[in-house]
Image: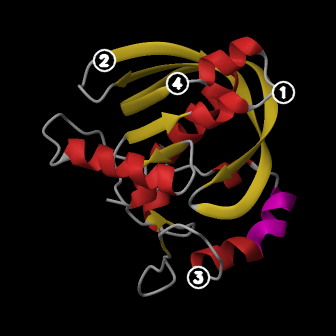
Amino acid sequence: MILPIVAYGDPVLRKKADFLDSDYPDLEQLISDMWETMYNANGVGLAAPQIGRPIRLFLVDTEPFAEDEELSESERAALKGFKRVFINARMDSETGEKWAFNEGCLSIPDIREDVSRKDTITLTYQDENFEERTETFDGLLARVIQHEYDHIEGILFTDKLSSLKKRLLKGKLTNISKGKIEVDYKMRFPAMKKGRN
């Protein structure tokens, strides 16, 4: 089932998400619905707070980036077929050089900005079977994971912009929260009584 994506301005996007355990109700169905919702919106990642659930769950599928011809063969190979569920993720380290990349977010449609992040991360998390893993990711893969991880920490990519850039975007962000934007996927706007398609 395709779920509405929560728009900028909803308090759920600012909440540090709660840990969940294996008896979380209908978790398998929730994960399935999140995949369907993400693909319907042409996203490469989706976090539970973006569908109104303040829990530490996000998923990533970087396949669309694997087609980018500007990337090296090894970078494309790392992105191709990378599809993963992250539960109760914890950032162990962020290292390496900071680099800028143009990011967007399904909760903040029509806004894309360059965001600087460190190149390499180590993350401890559980997969959909609650098996614990610790893995290191780098490059674009690390960036997509960092962006989704921020969601479960109550952080949005716009928080990482300069004060000037934030002031310039204020009107656009207000319009998004009021639903004054055209989107081709289902959204729920905090400043409207009901979400709209």
Q: What element carries label 1?
A: loop
What residue is shown at x 23% (from left), y 25% (from top)?
Answer: 129
Alpha carbon separation for disc pair 1 and 2:
34 Å
Q: Does the magenta stretch include residue 165?
A: yes
Q: Mark 4 = which residue?
A: 81
Three-letter residue code for mark 3: Lys
Mark 3 or 4: in front is 4
Q: Mark 2 = which residue?
A: 132
How would you rate the neighbour count of disc 2 (Cα within 10 Å): few for under 14, some for 14-19, many for 20 or more?
some
Start-end of magenta stretch: 163-170
Q: Is mark 4 on a helix, strand or loop?
A: loop
Give the mark nearer the N terminus: 4 vs 1. 1
Query: Can you tell which mark lies on residue 178?
Result: 3
Give the mark nearer the N terminus: 3 vs 4. 4
Q: Can the viewer see residue 94 in this picture? A: no
What residue is shown at x 25% (from left), y 39% (from top)?
Answer: 20
The image shows residue 93 at horizontal and vertical percentages of 57, 19
Mark 4 or 2: in front is 4
Q: Is residue 104 above or below residue 107?
A: above
Give the quadrant of residue 21: top left
Tags 4 and 1 touching, CB below 8 Å: no
Q: Mark 1 = which residue?
A: 70
Give the quadrant of residue 109: bottom right
